[in-house]
Image: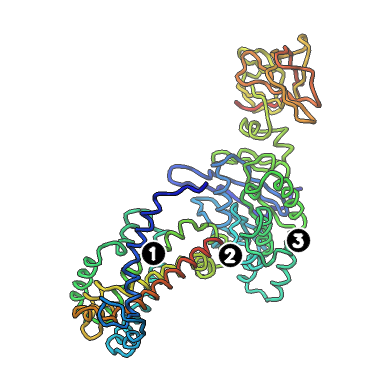
Amino acid sequence: MTPSPLLRISHLSKRFGQTVAVDDVSLEIRPNEFFSLLGPSGCGKTTLLRALAGFEDPDSGTVTIAGESGELDLLRLPPERRPINLMFQSYALFPHMSVERNVAYGLQRERLDRAVIRQRVDEVLQTVGLTDKATARPAQLSGGQRQRVALARAIVKRPRLLLLDEPLSALDRKVRAEMQLELKRLQHEVGITFVVVTHDQEEAMSMADRIAVMSDGRVEQVDSPVDLYTRPRTVFVADFIGTSNAFVGTLTSGGVMVPGIGMLPGQSVSADAGPEVTLIVRPEDIRFAPTGQAVLAGHVIDVQYFGGASTVAVRVEGVDRPVLVSCQGTTTLARGDATGLAWDPAAAVLLEA
Amino acid sequence: MRRVGWLALPLWLTYAFLYLPIVVLVVMSFNASKTPYAWKGFSLQWYRELMSDDLIRQGFINTLIVAVGATVLATALGTLLAIGINRYVHSALVEAYSLAPAIIPDLALAIGLLATFALVGVTLGLHTVLLAHVVFGMAFVAAVVLARLGHQDQSLEEASRDLGAGPISTFWRITVPGLMPAIVAGALLVFTLSLDEFVIAYFTDGPSTPTLPIVIYSMVRFGVTPEINALAALLLLVSFTVVISAQRITKLTDAL
């Protein structure tokens, strides 16, 4: 049973002049979940986030949030009265205030008691590990520290929902990996629902409970990371999440007939996949096979070794892009070697072309 | 190896050309002689005479009234103008028009203001000079503040709203503090410009309330007295102090 949603977005649209930034988006975000909006730049994910925070006025659609006294119409509230906080991509720390004054700012606006503010600021600074930087100015902090101040400033308000706009994009690789874990830990600890916007699929996959993949203002698919990877519902999702090999052909009883290549193994799970289909097969589902059992034949053009695994690129006559095959450890294949490829029909995913 | 830059020579010559008159002025203000042709020893008598001259003292007070008043008004209005342009004006032409009073010839502005005051039927006096100085002062403040707004992170104001501050609270707590260095620099600029402004004041002032530059002008018509040298030296001191502190403040806060 799924719990009743915390945030309900229905048929939300926003256009800027001729371009439709958000196109009829409907989403439900559950309490205490780590939700990610994933998509390439310009797909509308940031506009959607800003509309939730109150900085863009949607043209149509509704957004409601579950409150103590029933559903609350979010779009009718100005940003300062929404029970939501946004962590900006630039962090937007107030440069003329110390770390503790930045963090206290939101609580002071609620006109809370001085002692209460003091205590909550101290608590949250301890949570993010910045107690010793309380009196520093933002300009004196490193990128990772600034990010934690921005986070502290938002979670100290105890919002029902925290929106994070590309929270890790301003950090370098190593700090980013650390902060990924840190964000997840904090989300558990404070028990706030997180909605993270990112263009980095690895980031979304490693952190989120559920991901909405967006493209051209529309939501392509909403699912758990595992389901997105193993059961993509559109070609865009299959291509955007991880690496995949795609073949376009016609579905027949014996597999997929691809012009110029022949019959490839694959079986239809859903009835709605029409005669024209795209067959998706992940690199790790392909194995090298002797000529007799192979469904494709080609020669190796590149071998990449990544420590634990290798990726072999195979040029197949009639296929535009090299077919990628990954295998555990090292491989004996070298550039120029001829090889056959095969996969299990159940491993392939068939999508409407 | 240190290269001898031949361009250093014109540099120092230019500096000499720029500052020689000022050096002469300051030196002569301490000259005991009444004529500027000979040095007759160090003396502070011209400064003493300056202090006891009623005309000059009244002129100085008038100038201070105008300068302080114009600075306060021009700073407030100029800052609002800059924020308004930054937020609502998307035409470079309109933006240029708002800043024009800072660069159009003083004479044109002065004649225009005089004509306007006459049309409206206002009697001339310190209040009209003050208003006239607000006109160009506002444009200077707006130009300085606009430059600062150009590289201010827009999301700061959104962050403030997001954290629960209303638009007015956000303006005072986030927008104004962020612009403070530019506002202070603009105010100091207006103050120094107003302090020795002659052309516009000459046109828009009433006969009974001359500002200091007008007083000096009427004295100089009968020849430069060493007393004037002393006065000019003092004005110079004020201007330099203000300009240097303006620069310090801008630099200091730009580092933030």
| Alpha carbon distance from label 2 to label 3 | 26 Å
Q: Which mark is residue B122?
A: none
Q: Residue at x 63, y 65 (%)?
A: A102
Name the residue nearer the viewer: A309 or B211.
B211
- Relative to B31, is A274 above or below? above
Q: Which secondary structure, mark 2? A: helix
Please give the label number shown on residue A127.
3
Is residue A84 in view? no
- Total marks drawn? 3
Name the amino acid type tagged 2.
Arg
Q: Residue at x 78, y 28 (%)?
A: A309
**Callout 3: residue from which chain?**
A
**Mark 1, residue position:** B142
Q: Amino acid at mark 3?
A: Thr
User: Front-most of A313 and B13?
Assistant: B13
Camera sees residue A241: yes
Pointer 2 residue: A81
Q: Residue at x 56, y 67 (%)?
A: B165
Question: Could you tell me which chain the residue with mark 1 belongs to?
Answer: B
| Mark 1 Cα-neighbour bin, 10 Å: few <14, some 14–19, many ≥20 | many
User: Is residue A28 rendered to the left or right of residue B75?
Assistant: right
Element under disc 1 = helix
Which of the chains bears the disc numbered 2? Answer: A
Task: Say which element carries label 3.
Answer: helix
